[in-house]
Image (spheres, helix red, strand yellow):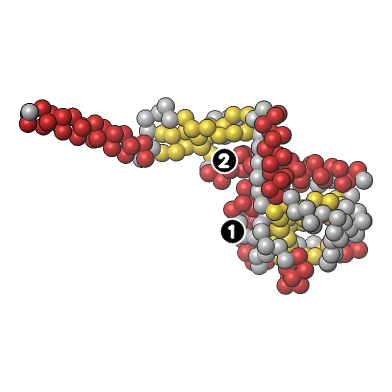
Amino acid sequence: MRYFLALKGLFFLVILCIVTCSLSLAQKKKTVYLDTLERPVEFLQMLSIRNTGRYKWYTDDTDEKIRYQRCSPTSKEEFDSLVARTAYKLVISEKIGTLFTYFDFVDVDGKVYKKSDLQGKVLVINFWFVGCAPCMVEMPELNQLYNNYKNNRQIVFLALAKSSEAKVRRFLERKTFYYPAVSMTDEVREEFRITAFPTNYVVDKNGMLTFATQGIGAGAVHLLKTHIASTLEQ
């Protein structure tokens, strides 16, 4: 009887050891994120791809040493559903229809944007700060958006930063952000009182906000793009 119990105990110890070792190996697996072309990308780049809403991520654990995070395209139905949920979560409905307060702005390159030059134009405003990870997640899509409209004289893009001009300059030396970057003065900060970043506004030619969101989400920049197009048509 004792011999049987000893064997039984040994059996459970072996099973426990196998399970523990398996979990340990699984925990030590290196995670590699692969983009749409199966190329390794950094975690932040993976988040940027996911933020488009065009791709979903899944785990591939078939390799013994590497845990792959791969992406596959979302269907039209999945994308539309994601965008609808993002709109519900991010749109600041109480801001839409309110008047935008114009200021004279000077970007970090010294270019002046006078109130008189901004009035009568469609404005696309991004509020951000250096060190804001969600802000960086949406920047690749914002850069594409800027490139789509950079030759359109009816629209002005501005990135109003909570950070100092020196910090913004250092950031732009390392990272790519095409929006003209402005370090907000105390007066501008007090006027807009942005509490969540990133925040995105679209202002029509009459100075009224037609779009306002806080935060990021799948398809958020698609929403922004759609409202820019509709505002330009007004």
Q: Nearer the viewer, residue 133 or 90?
A: 90
Query: Could you tell me which residue is drawn at 10 percent across and 27 percent down?
Result: 4
User: Where does the N terminus fall, quadrant-wise?
Assistant: top left
Q: Amino acid at mark 2?
A: Met
Q: CA distance from mark 2 to mark 1?
A: 18 Å
Mark closer to the chain start, 2 or 1: 2
Query: Could you tell me which residue is drawn at 16 percent across and 29 percent down?
Result: 8
Answer whether residue 164 is visible to the viewer in this image: yes
Query: Could you tell me which residue is drawn at 49 percent across and 32 percent down?
Result: 59
Q: Nearer the viewer, residue 2 or 9?
A: 2
In this rendering, the answer to whether 161 lies above or below 155 is below
Q: Nearer the viewer, residue 197 or 39?
A: 197
According to the picture, the residue beneath numbered tag 2 turns out to be 46
Percent of width and height locating residue 224: 76, 45
Spot the residue most to the bottom.
Answer: 186
In the rendered view, does 216 fall on the left or right side of 22? right
Near mark 1 (Cα within 10 A), the count class, few <14, some 14-19 or many ≥20, is few
In this rendering, the answer to whether 208 lies above or below 26 is below
According to the picture, the residue beneath numbered tag 1 turns out to be 131
Spot the residue most to the left.
Answer: 2
Secondary structure beneath label 1: loop
In this rendering, the answer to whether 225 lies above or below 62 is below
Percent of width and height locating residue 169: 65, 61
Secondary structure beneath label 2: helix
